[in-house]
Image: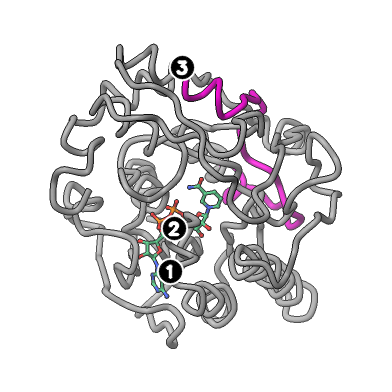
Amino acid sequence: MPISVVTGGAGFLGSHLCERLLDAGHRVWCLDNLDTGSLTNIAHLRQDGFTFVNHDVTEHIDIPGDVDFVLHFASPASPIDYLRLPLQTLKVGSYGTHNALGLAKAKRARFLTASTSEVYGDPLVHPQPESYWGNVNPIGPRGVYDEAKRYAEAMTMAYHRQQGVDTAIVRIFNTYGPRMRAFDGRAIPTFVRQALEDKPITVFGTGQQTRSFCYVDDLVSGILALAFSTEHEPVNIGNPGEFTLLELAELVVELTGSKSEIVFEALPVNDPQQRRPDISRAQELLGWEPTVDLREGLQRLLDESSRAELTGRIVGA
Ligand code: NAD
């Protein structure tokens, strides 16, 4: 039975990853300090073969016995979280990644780190291929996240080149699905929460900035394909369907049958103007591409989550 360690396993993506690894017959160690994650996300995974350890991965990681895969997902991920936790974000991207790589080296495990489309910053190349080096402001408020992830990529490649660790880097584009937190500040949970309560939908700027949204099941399939491959260079995983924030808001209003009005608020500092993954490498190397478009994915999110979860009116949501 393969043995996997998932850091950040009690978070949104980490909990879906733990679930799919268990389904694939893995034994799973889930390490999380619950900074932005929740035990509610993994309550349904408490079974033989699943172990939760409340651990801050900026401290040394010790796992008994063999490990085959280390999947490093621990990090605040939404702007609200990393602006509230700037030092923790830098520390988990640096010390946390160092410790997770150290574990993979000691156990001779394959290592995969969750990087992000934010390494491209406010991109001057569109869509973004992995060969683009990005346009990031290191000292802006978002720099704590973007630079932590860029550093994590640099350290991952150094462990691969100097220490021979079997590493992989996934650059994740905006992902959504059940178990996102209603108040985490990202566009989809915010718009859905506001629409379900018939409150004004708050679109930043003129709403003409674009994003590409990937349904979580598609994302996890891509991540597992990369984890089980032999690729070392970064691979974009995301859905190339590109929408303006205004289009997204209108679609959410339509699908929820909401009476909400759309209102416009000031654009956050260094908010990227456009985002769309070039997924040619994922298609060629992994034979992966997304299968769920935005309309279907939003409908699934609405069908598979309770109203209380989507409006943040339950503990742990
Ligand atoms: P999340 O906040 O739901 O999950 C992150 C998890 O990491 C939480 O459970 C949190 O408690 C845990 N964590 C944070 N610091 C820790 C530490 N020091 N020690 C142990 N655990 C710690 O966020 P998410 O959306 O699931 O993101 C997961 C990963 O994917 C992150 O690395 C994020 O940067 C990356 N990512 C996510 C997206 C997305 O659209 N969701 C996009 C790009 C990259």
Label 3 belongs to which residue? 251
Label 1 belongs to which residue? 84
Query: Could you give the CA–CA distance between mark 2 and mark 1, rounded to whole angstroms?
Result: 6 Å
Say whether marks 2 and 1 touch (CB < 8 Å): yes
Magenta stretch encompasses residue 242: yes
Residues in magenta, as a range? 225-250
Residue 306's disc number: none
Q: Amino acid at mark 3?
A: Leu
Query: Could you give the CA–CA distance between mark 3 and mark 2, rounded to whole angstroms?
Result: 24 Å
Q: Position of residue 221 (x, y in %)?
A: 51, 36
Q: Position of residue 143 (x, y in %)?
A: 65, 67
Compared to residue 121, the image places residue 275 above or below, namely above
Who is closer to the viewer here, 72 or 161? 72
Label 2 belongs to which residue? 80
Mark 3: give few (<14), some (14-19) or many (20+) Cα within 10 Å. Answer: some
Compared to residue 281, the image places residue 51 above or below, namely below
| Ligand 1 within 8 Å of the CB at mark 3 | no
Q: Amino acid at mark 1?
A: Arg
